[in-house]
Image (cartoon, helix red, strand yellow):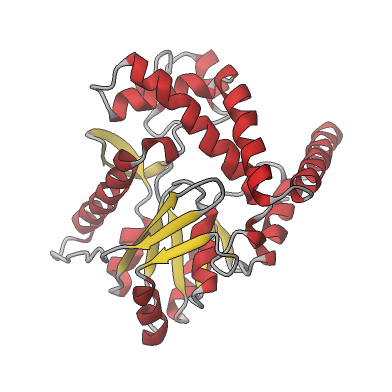
Amino acid sequence: MADKPSFGQDLSWRIEAAGYDLMRALLRALPVDAASAFGGWLLRTLGPLSANQAVARANLGFAFPQMSEAEKAALLPRIWDNIGRTFAEFVLMDRITPESGRVEIVGRERLDAIKASGKPVIFVSGHFANWEVMMVALFSAGVAAHVAYRPTNNPYVNQRIVEGRARYGITLLSPKGKGGRDLMLSLRRGTSLAILIDQKDSSGVEVPFFGKTAPTMPGAARMALHYGLQVQPLEIERLKGARFRMTVGEPIVLEKSGDLDADIVAGTERINSFLERVITARPQEWFWVHRRWRRSAYPGGDTKKRRKAADLYG
């Protein structure tokens, strides 16, 4: 922690961490499918009572303007179910692996070719189904990848998450926005990068996302263009319960025109097109409950009260 927290803040963090420990212990005592189902039930019940319900509904309207209110109402419980399952499964990922039979990899030959080449790539994906499957599957395939992640605000919980990921082999982690140097060093050493690129980046490039301009992380396109690397999309799909399919799709080849800034924007747009395709195919499996577009796009987004509330989840 850069600054020493107040006694009250530190106590609050420690209480939250104790709650995390208790929930983790309870979930790990259950069979995987039972824990997943419990998480789905919990957020189907509690999620609609939170402010995030309105955010998800607004996001659906932005992405699918032709979707009726009845269709949104039918979809939202499925969205909460997937998120709840994912959160519950998070502490069980050492049991949700290709080796356990719970993760199927389509296009495994592409991962084998990447590993054999010795040349790094930029893996890109989004918060699809259970997004931790990406890390587990890459590790299982023997592909070394440095993962950019967004740390939690609570440093004690964040440390537990980092330690949990180490249980299934994920040890190269850098926080988004602060680990750029580490990521570049990894690339130079021949280690691939894995980035979830579908969340808002307030300082990113403004490119269309479902036809509506959204601030988007340019890092994947920038590094791919700078180092002449392939962008490899990964699609995660929930099959049934806590079983998944990861599809290693056709690589995205970014073109160089001589105008780097324009090329970064064009490359980021191509990556967004991949995200849009996956989200449209299975909207119930995307993380709709965060503010993907600028806050001013949301009802009441310019008021101080709404902006303060939005800090909790957007």
| Residue 157 x, y percent position in the rendering | 73, 47
| As drawn, 162 above or below 192 | above
Residue 273 in view (yes/no): yes
- For the point 42% across and 35% down, the residue is 284
Look at the image and tell me whether residue 286 can be seen: no
Q: Residue 299 at x, y = what percent?
A: 40, 14
Q: In percent of the image, x 28 and y 51: which residue is there?
A: 274
The residue shown at (55%, 20%) is: 48
Q: Residue furthest left?
A: 257
Query: Vertically, is 138 above or below 307?
Result: below
- When asked about the image quadrant of residue 164, the answer is bottom right
Residue drawn at the location 59% of the way across and 41% of the way down = 85
Residue 19, position in %: x, y?
80, 38
Q: How many marks?
A: 0
Q: Residue 136 location, x and y as percent? A: 55, 64
Q: Would residue 305 be found to the left or right of residue 105 on screen?
A: right
- Depth check: 68 or 156 in front? 68
Looking at the image, residue 23 sits to the left or right of residue 185; the answer is right
